[in-house]
């Protein structure tokens, strides 16, 4: 019994001691606690948002603080302050670096105020885990990081491109980190590595499992030594310019779980075997525009969870075996080249949350797919394909589906009644750009969460605005480009519409009256009724709505009723252009955007117009039959664009107009007189000043040089008298300069001006009195005419954005192209023009013009140019129109012009050109008139394809009167006849005269043996064989 008691006592004592000793040693070492508290004092943080730092205080042991981990001996070995939102600047003196037993340090997602990573980090040699991601560090990564030889995880990602290696290469940083298994340097600038990065990593980090180098400015291709990293489970290289094929050896990475190679400029065929790595769960190849490939047959129970191929050239069919990927949660094949049917096996993907198949060439019906089995599907996008048949109802029964987009297909028929949709989560429905017809059933509004409906561009004839059992609110309803009629009369006895929408688009239908249900729209803010056939008067009740955007353009309105007295409206944008509105300009309306253009006001501008529109950003009254003077009150407009073009306005330009904060002033095509006010302010904001086609006189305003933002200047077809406006040379944004048909004079060189025009794409100086030579030094600065801008779809304009979207004022000019006067409504950046015609320019044409490789139109006609056409013109591969007529050019037409495949208009008539016209497919299309007036030119199409020379002289020295098409070059013919006769005599003598033949061979051998004596020794004893073997010749 005593023995049993002793055993029990020893067991109890041992257990107690073993529990007390670790507890004693877990007490925080005082020095380390003080270091932590001192470090806390250096931090700025919001205690209301902190979950860890608020637990740090001197009254408790530091080992109990959140974010602090201690060893059994009370040493701080782990510090995790990630996402604490603190800020500080840290340096080598920080008390943090006294914690030299740290094995784990995590400062991710804080703010170190763009300071550098201290070199003292190298003192923490026990570190296994270092995470400084998203911590706002900049500068060079200290080389002392290389001292942390025990590191297994290093994460310096998401600090921005200003964190870089500097002079030290990647190899120096990681060569000692042989234990590293996880390396993340996302956003670190590694451009200095070139294409060596893959070799450096593979030779230094044999145990690497995770490699993330997103947006590191890497280049490629990937070296084959990278295949040694066969333990990789995660590889992220997104956003680099690898520019090479995807290595086939990636398929040998048997542990690979995640492969992300988006936007890397990979090209060639993607190795299909990679998809079949058993462990692979995620593949992202999006935005590799030249990457080709097709999908393999997937095995049953495949491990893929995410497959993203959007923006590549993957093609072929989507295999039925895609249904074997039971774990797939995201399938994104947007903007590829897939064809064939949408497979029914998609219904097996019960984990699928996001399915994007838009912008392919899938062609099949989809109503046989059991969409309702995809119970986790949130987004379904099949837009912009070739799908056909009727739209099934099963997708509307998917319980979690929020967005359904079937737009841009060939679906037809009517929508069926919606049933059993009370639990639907559908929020956005887009069925636009199909062939749907008939009326939309009322039951579509039974979808309880439906808020955005787009049914535009179909053949629909009705929508259930009436007949709802209860009120229904929508954010957006787009029914534009259909065949809606709205025959509902809306009489007093008719029930009001219970449908309310904030955005309603009924543009381009067949409306012939204002829909009366609009009167009850209490929440409507945006209404578009443009491009219908509504005549008559705009009713005043429209102003009682809460509208902020109203578009009534392109109808048949002739007048509009003023708002009722006391009514308040919040209209920000009003578009009434292209109607038939008559009478006075409606001053009772105001807004940021007012477009009254292309109407029939037939009135003068009210003198107080500016008092009613002080906050208008865009005002257009162009093409509205306005006359009279421009009132001074227009200067009260504080907006950005004023367009009064194409009217009959007269008088002078108000002096105050050039002192406004406007960015665009367009007064083209009026009857304005006087001079341009020369009072443009310093810091002038003008970007477009269009005064062409008026009767403006006087001098060029020198103060216009203050408008340093000026892009378009149109003063064409006026009566301005001055020298070339050299001050404009200092306005580098200038893109269009129109001075044609004025009275400018003198040379265009500006030797005292250092400015350039790198953006200049159109310069028209035609029909003036400029003279002298064209300065070649200026041409060399016109960079916009030198670069290839194919594929740009934008055009020159002033753009303005607000919360209701964007609008722009598109610059318009009138110029002469291919001999025809044309209005350019939109100036594309690819359109470039030089027109110096009808001046007095002299000297030779600068060869530097040939360096303007993207020039489309060049007109130097009707000047006094001399010399030859520069052969460098053959470099202008984009040129379509070239006019050099009516000068004094000499020499031949350069044969290099025959290579200008886009040249569709050529005129070199009335010069002094000579020689044959170059032959090419392009030149054969030009008429005779393109070459006439050049006495020395010959060849098609000017003449028949006979040779033309100077005709033989008569006895009195005058030339004969033979037609140029009948003349023969006897010098050439006689040379050919002489050669033929001489050759015939020589050969005939050898054939038919034996004595001559023997003498010829003897003479030839003597000559050969004198030149080559060694032949005498070799052939001397065999000469007789030569003569014996010539028996054939003696026959």
Image (cartoon, rainbow, N blue to C red):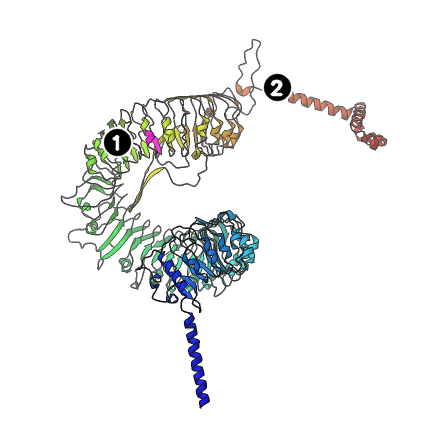
Residue 698, position as x, y percentages in the image: 30, 23
Which one is nearer the viewer's eye here, 680 or 477?
680
| Res 815 visible | no
| Res 535 visible | yes
> Disc 2 designates what residue?
971
The N terminus, quarter of image: bottom left
Of all residues shown, which one is farthest toward the left? 565
- Residue 657 is marked as 1
**Number of residues whose C-alpha sits closer than 10 Å to that of mark 2, classed few (under 14), some (14–19) or many (20 or more):** few
Report whether 1012 appears left or right of 201: right
Vertical comparison of 244 with 858: above or below: below
Q: Which numbered disc flags the more N-terminal residue, 2 or 1?
A: 1
Q: Are marks 2 and 1 in contact (CB under 8 Å)?
A: no
Report whether 813 appears left or right of 589: right
Q: Kindly identify the residue that appears in the image at 35 percent across and 50 percent down.
A: 433
Any magenta on residue 345? no
Residue 120, position as x, y percentages in the image: 46, 55
Which image quadrant for residue 838? top left
Any magenta on residue 713? yes
Nearer the observer: mark 2 or 1; the answer is 1
Q: Which residues are magenta?
A: 704-715
Residue 617, position as x, y percentages in the image: 26, 39
User: Could you tell me how far apart the alpha carbons at marks 2 and 1 are, in whole angstroms?
Assistant: 73 Å
Which secondary structure, mark 2? helix
Report whether 265 appears left or right of 994: left
Vertical comparison of 563 with 93: above or below: above
Q: Kindly identify the residue that appears in the image at 46 percent across and 88 percent down.
A: 3
Vertical comparison of 772 with 689: above or below: above
Of all residues shown, which one is farthest toward the front? 31
Residue 534, position as x, y percentages in the image: 23, 43
Which secondary structure, mark 1? helix
């Amino acid at each position: 019994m005593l023995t049993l008691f002793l055993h029990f006592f020893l067991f109890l004592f041992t257990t107690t001691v073993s529990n007390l000793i670790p507890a004693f040693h877990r007490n925080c070492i005082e020095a380390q606690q003080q270091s932590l508290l001192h470090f806390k004092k250096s931090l700025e943080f919001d205690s209301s948002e902190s979950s860890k730092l608020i637990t740090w205080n001197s009254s408790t042991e530091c080992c109990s603080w959140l974010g602090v981990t201690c060893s059994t001996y009370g040493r701080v070995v782990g510090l995790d302050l990630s996402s604490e939102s603190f800020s500080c600047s840290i340096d080598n003196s920080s008390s943090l670096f006294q914690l030299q037993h740290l094995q784990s340090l995590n400062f991710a997602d804080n703010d170190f105020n763009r300071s550098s990573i201290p070199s003292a980090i190298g003192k923490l040699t026990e570190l296994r885990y270092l995470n400084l991601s998203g911590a706002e560090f900049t500068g060079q990564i200290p080389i002392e990081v290389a001292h942390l030889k025990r590191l297994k995880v290093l994460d310096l990602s998401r600090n921005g491109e200003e964190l870089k290696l500097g002079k030290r290469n990647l190899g120096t940083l990681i060569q000692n980190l042989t234990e590293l298994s996880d390396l993340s340097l996302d956003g670190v600038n590694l451009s200095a590595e070139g294409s060596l990065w893959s070799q450096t990593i593979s030779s230094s980090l044999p145990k690497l499992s995770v490699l993330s180098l997103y947006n590191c400015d890497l280049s490629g291709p990937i070296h084959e030594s990278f295949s040694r990293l066969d333990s990789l489970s995660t590889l992220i290289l997104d956003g680099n310019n690898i520019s090479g094929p995807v290595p086939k050896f990636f398929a040998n990475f048997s542990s690979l779980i995640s492969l992300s190679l988006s936007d890397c400029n990979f090209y060639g065929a993607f190795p299909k075997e990679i998809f079949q790595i058993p462990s692979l769960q995620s593949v992202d190849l999006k935005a590799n525009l030249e990457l080709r490939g097709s999908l393999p047959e997937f095995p049953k129970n495949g491990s893929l969870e995410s497959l993203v191929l959007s923006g590549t050239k993957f093609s072929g069919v989507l295999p039925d075996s895609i249904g074997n990927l039971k774990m797939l949660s995201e399938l994104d094949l947007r903007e590829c080249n897939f064809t064939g049917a949408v497979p029914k096996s998609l219904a097996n993907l019960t984990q699928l949350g996001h399915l994007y198949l838009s912008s392919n060439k899938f062609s099949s019906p989809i109503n046989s797919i059991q969409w309702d089995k995809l119970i986790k599907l949130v987004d379904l996008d099949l837009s912009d394909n070739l799908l056909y048949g009727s739209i099934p109802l099963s997708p509307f029964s998917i319980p979690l589906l929020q967005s359904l987009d079937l737009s841009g297909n060939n679906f037809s028929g009517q929508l069926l009644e919606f049933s059993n949709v009370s639990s639907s989560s559908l929020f956005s429905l887009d069925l636009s750009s199909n062939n749907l017809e008939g009326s939309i059933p009322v039951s579509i509004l039974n979808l309880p969460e439906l808020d955005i409906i787009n049914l535009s561009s179909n053949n629909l004839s009705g929508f259930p605005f009436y007949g709802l059992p209860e009120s229904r609110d929508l954010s957006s309803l787009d029914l534009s480009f259909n065949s809606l009629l709205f025959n509902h009369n809306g009489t007093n006895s008719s029930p009001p519409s219970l449908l309310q929408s904030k955005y309603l688009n009924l543009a381009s239908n067949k409306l012939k009256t204002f829909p009366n249900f609009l009167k009850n729209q209490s929440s409507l803010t945006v209404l578009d009724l443009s491009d219908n056939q509504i005549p008559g008067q705009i009713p005043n009740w429209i102003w009682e709505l809460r509208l902020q955007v109203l578009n009534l353009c392109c109808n048949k309105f002739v007048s509009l009723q003023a708002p009722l007295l006391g009514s308040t409206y919040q209209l920000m944008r009003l578009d009434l252009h292209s109607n038939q509105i008559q009478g006075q300009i409606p001053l009772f309306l105001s807004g940021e955007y007012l477009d009254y253009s292309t109407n029939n006001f037939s009135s003068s501008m009210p003198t107080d117009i500016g008092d009613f529109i002080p906050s208008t950003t865009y005002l257009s009254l162009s093409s509205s039959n306005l006359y009279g003077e421009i009132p001074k009150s227009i200067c009260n407009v504080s907006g950005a664009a004023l367009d009064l073009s194409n009217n009959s306005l007269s008088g002078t330009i108000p002096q105050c107009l050039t002192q406004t904060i406007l960015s665009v002033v367009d007064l083209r095509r009026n009857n304005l007189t006087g001079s341009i006010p020369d009072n443009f302010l310093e810091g002038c904001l003008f970007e477009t000043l269009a005064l062409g086609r008026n009767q403006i006189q006087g001098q060029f305003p020198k103060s216009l040089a203050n408008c340093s933002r000026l892009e378009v200047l149109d003063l064409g077809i006026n009566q301005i008298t001055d020298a070339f406006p050299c001050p404009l040379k200092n306005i580098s944004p200038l893109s269009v300069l129109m001075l044609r048909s004025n009275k400018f004079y003198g040379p265009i060189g500006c030797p005292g001006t250092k400015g350039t025009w790198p953006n200049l794409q159109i310069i028209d100086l035609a029909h003036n009195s400029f003279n002298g030579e064209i300065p070649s030094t200026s041409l060399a600065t016109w960079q916009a005419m030198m670069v290839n801008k194919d594929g740009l779809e934008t055009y020159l304009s002033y753009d303005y954005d607000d919360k209701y979207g964007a609008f722009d004022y598109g610059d318009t000019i009138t110029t002469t192209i291919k001999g025809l006067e044309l209005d350019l409504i939109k100036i594309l950046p690819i359109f470039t023009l030089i027109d110096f015609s009808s001046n007095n320019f002299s000297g030779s044409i600068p060869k530097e013009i040939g360096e303007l490789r993207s020039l489309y139109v060049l007109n130097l006609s009707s000047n006094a140019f001399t010399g030859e056409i520069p052969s460098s013109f053959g470099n202008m591969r984009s040129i379509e129109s070239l006019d050099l007529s009516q000068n004094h050019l000499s020499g031949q037409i350069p044969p290099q012009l025959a290579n200008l495949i886009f040249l569709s208009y050529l005129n070199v008539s009335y010069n002094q050109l000579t020689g044959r016209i170059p032959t090419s497919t392009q030149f054969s299309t030009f008429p005779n008139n393109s070459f006439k007036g050049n006495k020395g030119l010959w060849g098609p199409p000017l003449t028949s394809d006979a040779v033309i020379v100077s005709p033989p002289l008569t006895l009195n020295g005058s030339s004969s009167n033979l037609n140029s098409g009948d003349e023969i070059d006897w010098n050439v013919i006689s040379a050919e006849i002489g050669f033929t006769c001489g050759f015939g005599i020589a050969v005939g003598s050898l054939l038919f005269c034996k004595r001559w033949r023997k003498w010829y061979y003897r003479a030839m051998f003597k000559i050969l043996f004198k030149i080559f004596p060694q032949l005498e020794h070799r052939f001397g004893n065999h000469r007789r064989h030569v003569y014996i073997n010539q028996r054939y010749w003696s026959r």
